[in-house]
Image: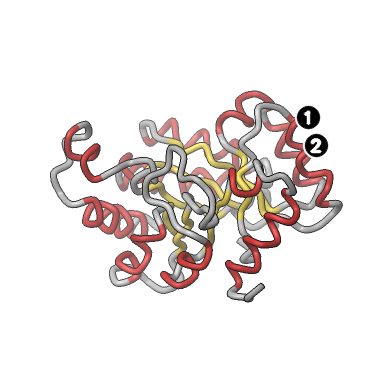
Amino acid sequence: MKNNLPIIALDFASVEETLAFLAPFQQEPLFVKVGMELFYQEGPSIVKQLKERNCELFLDLKLHDIPTTVNKAMKRLAGLGVDLVNVHAAGGKKMMQAALEGLEEGTPAGKKRPSLIAVTQLTSTSEQMMKDELLIQKPLIDTVVHYSKLAEESGLDGVVCSVHEAKAIYRAVSPSFLTVTPGIRMSEDAANDQIRVATPAIARKKGSSAIVVGRSITKAADPVKAYEAVRLEWEGIKQ
């Protein structure tokens, strides 16, 4: 990760919708996230087009499989030129280590390997859901911190977590460890299907390394103005 810009979640169904959204931003440097919907529709070509636009790119595919499969998949993803990729920490240390090895082996000579982070618990997961449906009886915060420690021990660069867990994570890992926090909303926006949400200002106060913002920007009447408001609040600049 080369900058501290808000990461815009490009949760669109096609390249046409994506490029139409980006057009008003001109050639402004952006950090964007491509998730499953867009990548599965467009494939590696969407990454190529976004990199040609000089975007820094988080490819959010949340790999979770046996170590060999994840290793081979990461070798392929490393060649795309993305900046940030992720796995599920619940896959365990061997899987996370295999993912890192695959990234290192697949990164072209002379290029920096993508940063690798692990999803702890999705921001749509509640304490009750974790206990009733996933049968994890430990408190959610304990699980998130434990997964973060496993990720660091596996050599990963950081985790995906909610804003509200960042401080606890930093009591257990090194300061350079990344905490990438989705579930970011402006104070006037609805939470939708997210549960553990926060504003950019709260994320900054609680020590998040990076924020991921979707609908507060992509569904705004004026996305450029909305992005600027998010960026300024994230940077601690009063408007």
Q: Nearer the viewer, residue 195 or 46?
A: 195
Residue pointed to by mark 2: 20
Q: Residue at x 30, y 60 (%)?
A: 149
Tag of residue 16: 1
Q: Residue furthest left?
A: 137
Say left or right for 51 vs 96.
right
Please state, as top left, top right, bottom left or bottom right, where the N terminus lies in the image. Answer: bottom right
189 or 8, nearer to the observer: 189
**Residue 202, position as x, y percentages in the image:** 46, 66
Three-letter amino acid code of the residue under disc 2: Ala
Q: Which mark is residue 46?
A: none
Residue lying at the far top of the rendered structure: 41
Compared across the picture, whether 79 is left or right of 95 comes to: right
Q: Position of residue 77 (x, y in %)?
A: 59, 39
Q: Quadrant of residue 50?
A: top right
Label pair 2/1, CB-CB below 8 angstroms = yes
Q: Position of residue 12 (x, y in %)?
A: 65, 32
x, y percent for residue 224: 75, 53
Q: Residue at x 62, y 60 (%)?
A: 230
How crowded pointer 2 is (Cα within 10 Å; few <14, some 14-19, many 20+) is rated as few
Amino acid type for the residue under numbered disc 1: Glu
